[in-house]
Image: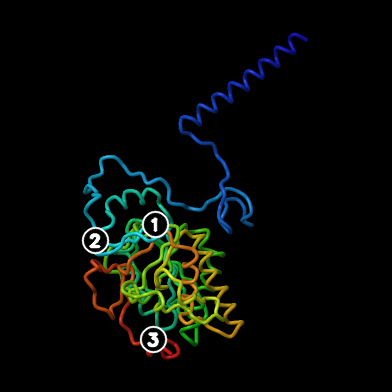
């Protein structure tokens, strides 16, 4: 009996010792494996139904960098005074001069996200692929892992481009379109489907971009956030909200009342965490489908639905029009650098229905 009790005491002492040592281990900064909560529809390792398991959703982590890095000392007194660099919900509004690329790269390259860029090159728009891809390799998230997902009805016209290390092209074949509006609305449909079937397993972060654009300067990790939106060049200053080209017809799901609005965002460049972008892209798709059932098409198609969503689900970072300018427009003094710009083109010639 005494021997039996002694064994119990020994086992209890060993268990207490293990608990004590485990507590010290955690206290000293170590962590134990655990399941984390993903957002709705988040991809979870080991669970094809995406209902349980360990979250594999990439997130911006601690803003750490290596020791010994040389960079200019930041100032609390000097900076851009000609533009606003923060929104009224306290999100960064990014302009040239509001970040240090040396510091940004040192922090974000360590996080090593897999970045997807979704572009549509349908019909004659394949002619813009070469310029977009070659300039992207020179300026867009250089030294990051990037996959260009090219949605096209002319796979044979996708050019062979020399890509940097860790950078790839994935071609997704889609049907041709009879109206340019079908291409615009189809972007949301086909992107939603391809995220579900492919991109979700290959990428952590996603940008939607227009193919008829060329990069001219650094487009870097300063643009990364949970959900980043770009100010439309035509409406970013000296425009009251009642002059924004929001959808004003109450019948549409994109409807925004005349006395509401923050900014007007372009749908030619936007990005975010993969699952946040999936949620937004799918929202634009389903809302457009609802409009179609009701016999209406939003005034600016998915851009109208995008602006409706971002009004009530604020972006975590707003990018200045540096991140999408247009060759049609002169460059004002407050745009210190054009990072990417839309090309001049004959819409009647390149669009399937003559630009109408």
Give the spatial CA distance, label 3 vs label 2: 41 Å
Residue under the point 62% across and 20% down = 14
Asked which secondary structure carries label 2, the reply is loop
Whether residue 282 is visible, yes or no, is yes
Residue 116, above or below 303: above
Q: Which residue is mark 2?
A: 81
Disc 3 residue crowd, few under 14, some 14–19, many 20+, Cα 10 Å: some
Number of marks drawn: 3
Of the residues under marks 2 and 1, which one precedes in the sequence? 2
Q: Quadrant of the C terminus?
A: bottom left
Q: Judge from the rendering whether residue 209 lies leftward or rightward of residue 256; answer left or right.
A: left
Residue 31 or residue 95, whichever sits in front: 95
Which residue appears farthest toward the front when viewing the image? 259
Residue 142 or residue 67, whichever sits in front: 67
- Camera-nearest label, 3 or 2: 2
Query: x, y percentage for residue 291?
Result: 57, 80
Query: x, y percentage for residue 158?
Result: 40, 75
- Camera-nearest label, 1 or 3: 1
Whether residue 130 is visible, yes or no, is no
Q: Which residue is mark 3?
A: 350
Q: Which residue is mark 1?
A: 90
Residue 105 or residue 133, whichever sits in front: 105
Residue 6, above or below 175: above
Render colour scheme = rainbow
Residue 22 or residue 129, whichever sits in front: 22
Q: Judge from the rendering whether residue 219 lies leftward or rightward of residue 207; answer left or right.
A: left
Where, by quadrant of the figure, is residue 214 drawn?
bottom left
Residue 53, above or below 24: below
Query: x, y percentage for residue 11?
Result: 67, 19
Of the residues under marks 3 and 2, which one precedes in the sequence? 2
Give the spatial CA distance, label 2 vs label 1: 17 Å
């Amino acid at each position: 009996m005494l021997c039996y009790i002694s064994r119990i005491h020994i086992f209890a002492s060993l268990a207490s010792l293990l608990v004590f040592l485990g507590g010290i281990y955690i206290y000293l900064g170590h962590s134990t494996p655990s399941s984390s909560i993903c957002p709705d529809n988040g991809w979870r390792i080991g669970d094809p139904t995406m209902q349980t398991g360990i979250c594999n959703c990439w997130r911006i982590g601690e803003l750490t960098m290596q020791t010994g890095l040389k960079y200019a000392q930041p100032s609390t007194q000097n900076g851009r005074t000609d533009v606003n660099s923060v929104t009224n919900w306290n999100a960064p509004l990014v302009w040239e001069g509001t970040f240090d690329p040396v510091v940004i790269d040192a922090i974000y390259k360590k996080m090593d996200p897999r970045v997807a860029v979704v572009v549509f090159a349908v019909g004659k728009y394949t002619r813009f692929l070469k310029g977009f891809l070659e300039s992207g390799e020179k300026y867009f998230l250089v030294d990051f892992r990037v996959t260009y997902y090219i949605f096209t009805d002319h796979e044979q016209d996708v050019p062979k481009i020399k890509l940097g290390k860790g950078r790839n092209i994935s071609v997704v074949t889609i049907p041709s379109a009879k109206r340019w509006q079908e291409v615009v609305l189809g972007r949301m449909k086909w992107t939603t489907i391809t995220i579900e079937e492919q991109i979700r397993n290959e990428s952590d972060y996603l940008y939607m971009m227009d193919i008829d654009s060329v990069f001219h300067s650094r487009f870097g990790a300063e643009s990364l956030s949970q959900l980043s939106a770009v100010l439309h060049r035509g409406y970013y200053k000296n425009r009251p909200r009642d002059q924004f080209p929001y959808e004003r017809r109450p019948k549409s799901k994109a409807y925004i009342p005349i006395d509401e609005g923050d900014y007007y965002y372009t749908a030619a460049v936007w990005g975010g965490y993969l699952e946040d972008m999936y949620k937004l892209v799918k929202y634009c798709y389903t809302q457009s489908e609802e409009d179609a059932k009701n016999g209406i098409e939003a005034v600016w198609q998915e851009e109208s639905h995008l602006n409706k969503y971002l009004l009530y689900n604020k972006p975590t970072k707003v990018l200045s029009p540096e991140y999408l300018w247009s060759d049609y427009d002169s460059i004002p003094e407050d745009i210190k650098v054009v990072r990417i710009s839309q090309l001049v083109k004959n819409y009647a010639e390149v669009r399937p229905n003559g630009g109408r």
